[in-house]
Image (cartoon, rainbow, N blue to C red):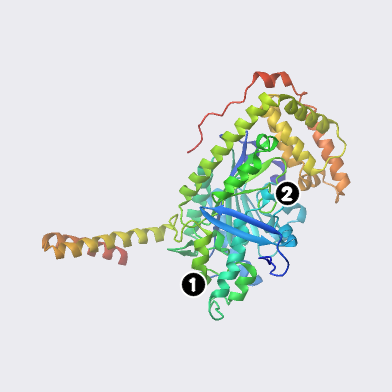
Amino acid sequence: MQCDVCQAKEATVFLTQIVDGKMQKVNLCEACSKEKGVNDPTGFALADLLMGLGAAQEIEKSPGALKCPVCGFTQADFKKTGRLGCSACYGVFAGALSSMLKNMHKGTSHTGKAPAALQERRERGERLRELQDNLHSAVAAEEYERAADLRDQIRRIEAGSAA
Amino acid sequence: MKFSRIIASSGEWLSGDGPHRNIVVSSRVRLARNLREKPFPGWAKKAERLDVMRLVKDAVENLPEMADSYSENLEALSPLEKQVLVERHLISREHAAKGVGSAVVMNAPQTLSVMINEEDHLRMQAICCGLQLSKVFGMIDRVDSELESLLDYAFDSSLGYLTACPTNVGTGMRASAMLHLPGLVMSEQINKIVNSVNKIGLAVRGLHGEGTEAIGNLFQVSNQTTLGETEEEIIGRLNRVIEQILEHEHNARATLAQRKAITLHDQIGRAYGILSHAYSMSSKEALNLLSVIKLGVDLGVFPESARFPVDELFIETQPAHLQKGAGTQKMSADERDSLRAAIIRAKLQNVQVPDIARLKEKTPEPEPEDHDE
């Protein structure tokens, strides 16, 4: 069996780790296992290693030579460094990144802090969607008085965001 | 503020107080932030890095939290000064390797520090003594909220804060606690604990983070994932795991004191003997022996007054601190080892010989549950 890192030497170190119920396996040759600090269990997390490998493999799958129009970063650069070029790269390499992020993290979408200005917009958007859903159901149920009231509320919120 | 003033005081996280501080040396929360559509530091050209640095540094220096701050471009710091900051956990080893186009800003008590153009445009951290991750997060969250109105952050409504490395995307947060776990090491349970913590998606690392050796029985526990959970959820999960580790550590100490009392007495006595009589001591040996003395203080074998001097030695005996304290030209490793031994001998003169009888009186009991959660 070949080493997963250098793809050249015979693998002699076999690691298995279970993260969140998912089994991850990695096979390494002696030189690569030393380099990755596998001999020192305290300084080593299999996930780190797998993330690095995963990144390179995922990006290889994406078709054509993608290049970020903002910073000029290419998929070859990503493969080499495991880092991205700028914030716009997340859009450019979205296809390859999405499955990688799924393996790497607990979820695929952000639920934590957002800059306050964005947070307000996010909340207003949610409130609008809710009101519009209610409006549709009110119209469908021929509750026109309630519908008119909902329409006014929606207008007020929209006017607020334009101001 | 001058660098010499940073050197002179030891930083609040070392001398301060906090819940579970006997075992939890420090709590730290770091946030990674970037500017929209500006190349990340690792990809940016020098001119672009300098532009971002000026912009960010200006915003950070003018924060009310940074009213009395130390701010410096990295090329203006000597390798030794950078290493001092690394040893105090104020900048990362990666940041210390940077030069033109990178900077660091920190407040006077050394509880807040902002690395500019490390792997991300901003890496800001708060650090405090003891287990108080929520409080520490609150400190750095405030700084972040102030900066977001001044800087155009790279944020995506579905991916969160965008970072140079996809492993940090989302919250961009790494929360960690430094734990002193001699009981689990001596009772050979530490590998079991490390493995089970790794299994639930948290990382356990050595003294200086990724890829470093666990010396002095010091271990850093931190979150591994940053996307799909809120900051509070991540901290809550980390807190629960740390509390369990603390319980195991207390149990291990109690068991050692009861069943392996002689081994424990012997280790403490030898550590004290070597530290107070050695004339040459490596950094690693010093940390490993000081760890045993620290355990002795926790167990009541040394008076409580010995705690601060011993904690201080953990930092003061690190290579760059020694060199800086000596104020001479570059010392050789042998000279450092001999100076280190001298500093330890001097400090331990004020610490009386271990009173093993007191260990028997005092059965270690869990600390009261009064932290910030």
Q: Residue at x 45, y 59 (%)?
A: A110
Instruction: Please give the label number shown on residue B84.
Output: 2
- Few, some or many residues within 10 Å of mark 1 (<14, 14–19, 20+): some
Name the spot of residue A113 as percent of width and height, x first: 45, 55
Q: Is residue B113 visible?
A: yes
Chain holding disc 2: B
Q: Secondary structure at mark 2?
A: helix
Residue B13 located left or right of residue A109: right
B330 and A63: which is toward the camera: A63
The vertical placement of A39 against B117, above or below, is above
The vertical placement of A13 against B350, above or below, is below
Q: Name the amino acid, label 2.
A: Val
Q: Residue at x 62, y 62 (%)?
A: B119
Q: Name the amino acid, label 1.
A: Gly
B24 and B305: which is toward the camera: B24
Instruction: Please give the label number shown on residue A44.
Output: none
B115 and A110: which is toward the camera: A110
Q: Secondary structure at mark 1?
A: helix
The picture quadrant where one finds residue B317 is top right
A55 and B36: which is toward the camera: A55
Q: Which residue is mark 1?
A: A95
